[in-house]
Amino acid sequence: MKKILFFLVLLIFPVSDIFAEEDSEGWERLADMPEVRSEMESSAIGEKIYVVGGITNTNHISDSVFVFDTKTESWSTGTPMPLELHHAGTAAYDGKLYVVGGYMKGWSPSNALLIYDSVKDSWSQGKDMPTARGALTAEFVDGKLYAVGGFNENSRTENEVYDPADDSWEKMSPMPTTREHLASAVLDRQLFVIGGRAGQVNSDANEMYDYTSDTWKILEPLPTARSGLTASVISGAVFVFGGESSLRTFEENEAYIPEEGWFTQQPMPIPRHGLASSTVGDSIYLIGGGVVPGFSFSGITEKYHNTVVPEFGVLSIVILGISAVMIILFTKPKFQHIIQQ
């Protein structure tokens, strides 16, 4: 019996090593965006990522649409937006890109909803959002667009939902923590809203919205409070990248797994804020953003993959737990007596 236990332990430890392979996570630098910018947004439709608006290095507000083909890893352009916008929210659904809110010239907050048809390469306009605001975040959940947070004279808690089926808006339960320049992602039909700031104070808030009950749940805080960050989902985790404070631009890459918590991952090769991110397949593409706090710009495009999250996830913990029990059974005299019987 002792020999059987010994060989079981030897077999289990190599299995746990598989779940911590270093080559399961990594970064790759791709072709730069054709024009440097920050405070733009992106969303993926199929294998293409659409990057809209933003502020360029001349402090010019852009109406440009850049399209990154993840299959060929090359850039092209689309029909420009009807408005020049920065700090907008974007989300994709059913082959269309929805651009909501943001700032126009003179930092005037917008309530416009612009809709881009990726097949026709053309724009239309939906019903205006109830509350004009920029520096918000937007996501589709089960066919409806949720526009959360933002700023217009003050930081906001608004949570307003758009139904493309009847071109209508509805006010929902507000976000618990007031903030703008925040990030969001959807995992398992739940909307996670993370980080941001209110005024000059960065937030570590991590809150989850359940649209089925119109309720919010406060979760374990983001380990590194930051604003101007971005978030995307792969491997069953929400990955949160970059951001800024008044002192520095963040390289942090922190992953959140519901019911497990936060895990530190490989940092960004080039720290940035005001960047965009989108998931295609099993990779996250991070685009543009400023390399120093405040007004700065880049065209940097990076690809991040992580097929094992975290290094010690639930399965690894279970395996290690079983191994520990076996070791105890193998070494404790009183258990040895039972085994020998």
Image (cartoon, rainbow, N blue to C red):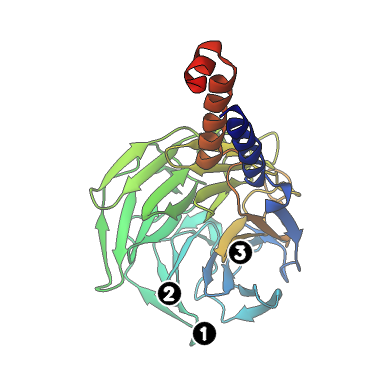
CB-based contact (under 8 Å), mark 2 and mark 3: no
| Pointer 2 or 3: first along the chain | 3
Q: From this viewpoint, which residue is outermost toward the top?
A: 334
Image point (47%, 20%), residue name: 341
Q: What residue type is labelled 1?
A: Asp
Could you say where residue 8 lies in the image, as x and y percent from the top left?
59, 37
Residue 40 appears in the rendering: no
Point out the image quarter for the N terminus.
Answer: top right
* Viewer-closest of 8 and 65: 8
User: Pointer 1: what residue?
Assistant: 121
User: Pointer 3: what residue?
Assistant: 61
User: Pointer 2: what residue?
Assistant: 115
Disc 3 to disc 1, how far (Cα)? 21 Å
| Pointer 3 or 1: first along the chain | 3
Could you say where residue 318 lies in the image, as x and y percent from the top left?
50, 36
Q: What residue type is labelled 2?
A: Ile
